[in-house]
Image: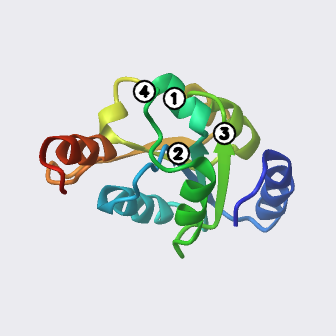
Amino acid sequence: MIVSREELKDIIAKLRKEGKKIATTNGAFDILHIGHLKSLEFAKRYGDTLIVGINSDESIKRYKSKDRPIISQDDRARLVDALSLVDYVTIFDEKTPEKLLEIIRPDFHIKGSEYKDNIPEQKTVEKYGGKIVFIERDPKDISTSMIIKKVKENGTC
């Protein structure tokens, strides 16, 4: 279900009352691919409920490139929401998800191992007793940037 921050506040309160463990992850999810799926599958193992924060179009333009995203935020949210292992999706405008995580206060926040040395959201997650969990990336996995590069170079994936 795609929800706003306001809706998320009520959902979180209900989940906490029910004693549910909450896992979160975040990203652009531009050109959905197998690396995204593996990350989401990994994240789902840590909670009864998986909430995915998706960077808004403007957020991606600020931290990736003026030429990104390829897919609009509404379409990216719909694609991620369509995956059965994802319980809730919300879009955030900031470069990083600290403000969103202040609302959710997840038990576990999942990040790719490439972020081990730079996790701005770690303080926020740990402040509320949550834990950052890293997923080790398979070197054979692709990324959206790799897909874009390959298409530009070869015209195909």
Q: Is residue 117 above or below residue 93?
A: above
Instruction: State the residue position of label 1.
Output: 61
Give the amino acid at mark 4.
Ser
Q: CA distance from mark 4 to mark 3?
A: 17 Å
Please tell me whether mark 4 sits on a helix, a strand or a loop: loop
For the point 40% across and 23% down, the residue is 118
Label 2 neighbour load within 10 Å: few <14, some 14-19, many 20+: many
Q: CA distance from mark 2 to mark 3?
A: 9 Å
Q: CA distance from mark 2 to mark 1?
A: 16 Å
In the figure, residue 152 lies in which quadrant? top left
Q: CA distance from mark 1 to mark 3?
A: 13 Å
Q: Quadrant of the N terminus?
A: bottom right
Instruction: State the residue position of label 4.
Output: 65
Label 3 neighbour load within 10 Å: few <14, some 14-19, many 20+: many
For this view, does 146 lie left or right of residue 20? Answer: left
In the figure, residue 116 lies in which quadrant? top left
Give the amino acid at mark 1.
Lys
Label 4 neighbour load within 10 Å: few <14, some 14-19, many 20+: few
Residue 107 visible? The answer is no
- Numbered label attached to residue 132: none
- Numbered label attached to residue 26: 2
- Numbered label attached to residue 92: 3
User: Do labels 2 and 4 touch, CB within 8 Å?
Assistant: no
For the point 52% across and 23% down, the residue is 62
For this view, does 128 lie left or right of residue 156? Answer: right
Residue 19 visible? The answer is yes
Give the amino acid at mark 2.
Asn
User: Do labels 1 and 4 touch, CB within 8 Å?
Assistant: yes
Q: Earlier in the sequence, mark 1 or mark 3?
A: 1
Where does the image place residue 13, in percent across and percent down from the top left?
Answer: 84, 56
